[in-house]
Image: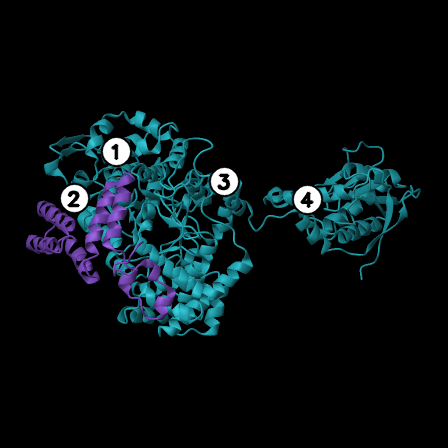
Amino acid sequence: MTQARPIGRFRFMDEQRVNLDGFAREDPQLGLVAFNSPSDPTPSLVIEGGVVIEMDSKPAADFDIVDAFIATHALDHAVAQEAMALDDLDYARMIVDPNVARAEVVRLAGGMTPAKLARALATLRPAELVIAMTKCRARRTPSNQAHVTNRSDDPLLLAADAATAAAFGFRELETTVPVLGDAPSNAIAVSIGAAVGSPGILIQCSVEEALELELGMRGLVSYAETVSLYGTEQIFIDGDDTPWSKAFLTSAYASRGIKMRVTSGGGSEALMGSAEGCSMFYLEARCVALARAIGSQGVQNGGIDSASVAGSVPGGVRSLMAENLMVMVRNLEACTGNDALMSESDVRRTSRTHPIFIGGSDFICSGFGSIQRYDNMFGPSQWNSEDIDDFLAMQRDWGVDAGLRTAAEPDVARLRRRAAEAVRDVYRVLGLADFTDEWLEQAVDAAGSKDVPDADLMTPLTASRLIRDTNVTMLDVIRALDDCGYDIEAQRLLEMLHARVEGHYLQTAAIFTEGMQVLSLVTDPNDYTGPGTGYTPTAARQLEIDSIRQQKSVDDLRGSQQAAASARLSATGFASPGTDPRDVVIGVSPATARAIWRTLCGLTVDEALDELLAGLEEEGCTGRIVRFNDTIDLGLIGLKAARLAGSGIGIGLQAKGTALIHRRDLTPLANLELYSVAPSLTRGAYRQMGINAGRHAKGSTPEPGRNPYSDEAIEARYHTTVVALVAIERECCDPAGFPESLTLAEER
Amino acid sequence: MTTAKSGKPLTEVTLDALRAGDLEIDDVRIHPDTLAAQARVAADHGNPQLAENFLRAAELTLLPDDRVMAIYEALRPRRSTALDLAAIADELEGLGAARNAALIREAAQVYQARNLLL
């Protein structure tokens, strides 16, 4: 039997990018269910003599390693009875109620088991999640994290891209390696580049647990995040760790003054084939409770590498956001996913991020791909370098702070050069590598590693071996920077080492401002209690959000019009009515040949007039150009032109290019032909309009010209320009002005 | 005033000191007393587990890097016998790292029950 071919409408729909995504039927057996699997345990907690003897319907004797650690370390026994007795919806309402303090929500969560908290948070609807996130995140000021990696571990490009990410406002940079051996070189290159871009940028190099700790101990990175937790025992052990090894690792980082958070995420257990029939959200609730139990200050979750698994099931995207919220109500730093790309569809990936974007979190993305997709060694991110301007525009649209700021090209160019030169100099002084001028120039200019053909893949590997063999620490890097004249950057990196000694940035949700002030749960606690409270950008920060580099004023437009000024049109005095039946008047608007010289389609006004006149001439008519100075209304300009014309036919032309044909006996708005889509007009269209006007003058009925049609967002592209052009027309308009004849000199 | 693990005041951890060759890695390491102070801050901000972590960390400042790495490795699944873990716990206890010793003894007990010993 052959499959019937679907109808065209469905063939067309099937071709859309969203249909590249996988959508799974719910299958609790496989863990392919977002919330409330039949196998999720019923919440319970029995404590006797200060010891948990039953948790979530499981007796202590049956505890696996995850249960055992949570039961021993996570729960606040003083609150447990009260918290476990709370109705799920009552607690959910407290979370969104602005009159209930965040501290109270946090206090009660301390007494809740994973199953209890999972059930309560599962009741929150999307809009409620947004409010809950606004209220419950730890830090008042939102922030963002970027990935900075490339295919060749090119130190110069890493440095230039780190400086670029810092310029765009990211406060944490995460690098990693395609080649494990390159890790120390990457850590140094990104640290230097970030220090060129801004003070106070936190740096991590995501690699295997032990190597990452070693990098931290040498001072080469300033935070760690790749400390993975899982919700089932089997997957935990497959990950070659236990809750105790992770707890020890957590303390090891703190013992060297290094910030650390753990990573988990719904769907990872299903992806690795051992979800024990439980929902993604319940398993993640275990991870979050464990994160709190081991003493981590924060969690990166929201799917992360398995975000697309969660995204494949009903309610999955909502569960990703609910995971983040769970971290917040457990009083931890939330680094809220929006990391690995979860959909081929731009619409779906935007939809997934948007509620978190407007709600605000400690880090909106736990890895915005600030580099090219192909250079992202974590795989493409939810947001990538091609989206930076989109993200900035979205911040501006909603007036929200999602951590980014606009950066001017000359500034970024200067920073990239300084970053690449600093790395080159430091590597030379430390005897790690030499770089050619060509390589450096390519790295400074590059949009991605494909633009750096001169990069030598062996360089980072050799440099990394030397860094490890000769025991290079951050102090050596700082000394080398200082020796080479980069004293500002040397000072900035030394301050990052000071931060480790002070330990303030070990507290929950810490970042540094550019003034090296720590913002954390302790110094910048979220104080949202309803409208008018909580985080509001300062005036200076709001200006950064609003002032994207693409915005233009009327003055900017006036300047660009002035650059197209021409002397071909000149006024020759009062325009009189014509008598010749072949006389057609082309009425032009007040700003013509005064302030507006170029139409929206890119043709100059002169060129549009050339074509109109030529079209009229083809039909044996004579065109006369008259500027009407007393109105900017195109219908009226066309009608006035028609009334001056011997033929009774006029053409109206606004300097921005919109045009129509009019006849003296018609009302202003009832024209014969209108070419309204000025940005899409061409020389041919103006020529045709001239021809048609000539035919009207001769009394025949031409085939009307059709507006060119396109599927582009013409209005989005041109409406701001139109507003400015109309303002300029109005400035040139004089209600007492008389019509002036204009002559158009031959093109020279 | 904050002092580094070495005892040097942070105000003396400067570029000038680095230029003079007067800085070493312990001058940019956190002092156990500082971690204890941060633990009090964490406890005051509703996170006793974070406080406990800082107190374990304060103890680990006393261990050299490679020893810390080795103990981490020993705690991974099926790396150690019960005796190995007991020895590490005793070693830590002897160094005054009682909290870490307790963590390791607790791990040994659960590892025994869950078949995670070598």
In space, the residues marked 1 and 3 are separated at their CA atoms by 39 Å
Residue type at mark 4 is Ala
- Determine the CA span between mark 4 and mark 3: 43 Å
> Are the residues under badges 1 and 3 in a single subunit?
yes
Q: Which residue is mark 1?
A: A37
Label 4 in the same subunit as label 3: yes
Which element is circle 3 on? helix
- The residue lying at 18 percent from left, 55 percent from top is B72
Please name the color used to draw chain B: purple
- The label on residue A123 is none
Q: Which mark is residue A65?
A: 2
Q: Amino acid at mark 1?
A: Ser
Residue A332 figure quarter = top left
Image color mode: by chain
Chain under numbered label 1: A
Mark with earlier residue (2, 1):
1
In the displayed orientation, state which residue is furthest to the left.
B83
What residue does disc 4 label?
A: A724
The residue depicted at 16 percent of the width and 44 percent of the height is A65
Q: Chain of mark 4?
A: A
Q: Which chain is cyan?
A: A
Which label sits in the foreground, 2 or 1? 2
Instruction: Classify mark 2: helix, strand or loop.
Output: helix
